[in-house]
Every structure is written in structure tokens, then in C-alpha cells.
Image (spheres, rainbow, N blue to C red):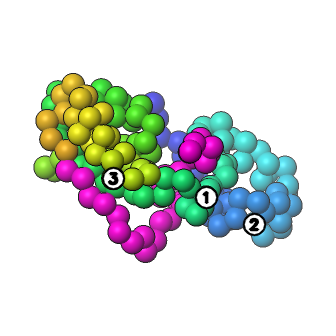
């Protein structure tokens, strides 16, 4: 699969949308000196190529499980992709990354209370075949979360008790 080519107009368009995805195509076209059809066509192509997506981000104040934890996971290297997918299927887990270093999987989790987190780490994650060790770090104060990097909340958690 070849890497998509982005030109300067694509990058400028993405930059504008990253600041405010609600801006009108007409305003973008005016700012970039192109016609509205060009903007509409570029946005459609970028979406079809899965280079951009539009979503509503929920604020942490709306989250019922607003506590964040990071879990550094040691897993069997021969099966790390399957293990990462299995961990990603766990509802409280909001992000999973395959890493290089002493831990080869990192998970970001939202939890209600420490009992939930303990059950998640000691039960669900350690029960995944191939996981050998889990170290959990709790977030005590969030200084910054950039929505350009990761969306750690989802609408499903808003309706859960």
C-alpha cells in the first residue's frame, strides 16, 4: 500500500480543519484562494483515504469514568499484535500502542474507581494469553491533552453508570 501524497493545499486545509472543523467550505476557500468546489473535493478525498475524520469530542467533565491510567505491558513478542488487539477489545481500554523498549504494549484506560482498575489490570489484562507482566501508572493531574493526538473518550461511556 503506497503512502498518500499530500500537497501544500492539502496540508493547509488539514491545518485549518484541525483548528476548527466547523469552519465553512466557503471560508476555507476564501482563506486559501481557491474555489469552494476544490475545498469540498479535497475534504471528500481526504476522508475517503482515511487521512481525516470528523468527530465530536467529549469533555472530560462529561465522563463518568474520568480517571486515567496507563498500563505498561510485557507480552510475548511473537504474538504482540494479537495481544494488542485482544487488549484493545476490553471496554475500559481506550488506546493501545505497540512499543519498543522494556514494555512492548501500552494501554490507556479510563476507570471509575481503583477496584475497577485492579480488576482490569490483574484480571482482564493479565488473563490475555501471552501477557507476562503489567505495571500501572495513575494520572493524578492532567496538565494537557491535545485532541490532535488522541481521543481517549467515547460516547458509549457517557451513557454507562
Looking at the picture, does residue 51 appear above or below residue 113?
A: above
Pick whichever, 122 or 102, lies toward us: 122
Q: Which residue is mark 1?
A: 62
Residue at the extreme bottom: 143
Regarding mark 1 in the picture, which secondary structure is present there? helix
Q: Could you tell which of marks 3 and 1 lies nearer the N-terminus?
A: 1
Task: Tally the numbered discs.
Answer: 3
Regarding mark 2 in the picture, which secondary structure is present there? helix
Q: Is residue 153 magenta?
A: yes
Q: Which residues are magenta?
A: 135-161
Q: Which residue is mark 3?
A: 114
Q: Residue at horizontal 35%, vertical 69%? A: 140
For label 1, the crowd category at 10 Å Cα-Cα, with few meaning under 14, some 14 to 19 and many 20 or more, is: few
Q: Residue at horizontal 65%, vertical 67%? A: 19
Regarding mark 3 in the picture, which secondary structure is present there? helix
Q: Could you tell which of marks 2 and 1 lies nearer the N-terminus?
A: 2
Q: Residue at horizontal 85%, vertical 55%? A: 36
Q: CA distance from mark 2 to mark 1?
A: 36 Å
Res 25 → quadrant: bottom right
Q: CA distance from mark 3 to mark 2?
A: 50 Å
Q: Are marks 3 and 1 in contact (CB under 8 Å)?
A: no
Asked if residue 95 can be seen in this view, the reply is no
- Find residue 32 and name its label: 2
Looking at the picture, does residue 101 appear above or below residue 127?
A: below
Q: Position of residue 144 (x, y in %)?
A: 46, 71
**Marks 2, 1: nearer the viewer:** 1
Amino acid at each position: 500500500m503506497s503512502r498518500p501524497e499530500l500537497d501544500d493545499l492539502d496540508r493547509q486545509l488539514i491545518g485549518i480543519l484541525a483548528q476548527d472543523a466547523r469552519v465553512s467550505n466557503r471560508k476555507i476557500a476564501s482563506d486559501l484562494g481557491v474555489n469552494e468546489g476544490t475545498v469540498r473535493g479535497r475534504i471528500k478525498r481526504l476522508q475517503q483515504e482515511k487521512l481525516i475524520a470528523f468527530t465530536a469530542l467529549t469533555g472530560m467533565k462529561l465522563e463518568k469514568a474520568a480517571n486515567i491510567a496507563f498500563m505498561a505491558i510485557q507480552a510475548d513478542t511473537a504474538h504482540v499484535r494479537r495481544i494488542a488487539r485482544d487488549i484493545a477489545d476490553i471496554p475500559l481500554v481506550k488506546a493501545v500502542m505497540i512499543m519498543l523498549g522494556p514494555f512492548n504494549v501500552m494501554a490507556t484506560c479510563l476507570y471509575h474507581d481503583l477496584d475497577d482498575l485492579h480488576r482490569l489490570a490483574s484480571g482482564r489484562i493479565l488473563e490475555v494469553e501471552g501477557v507476562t507482566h503489567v505495571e500501572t501508572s495513575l494520572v493524578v493531574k492532567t496538565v494537557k491533552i491535545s485532541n490532535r493526538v488522541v481521543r481517549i473518550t467515547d460516547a458509549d461511556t457517557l451513557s454507562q453508570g
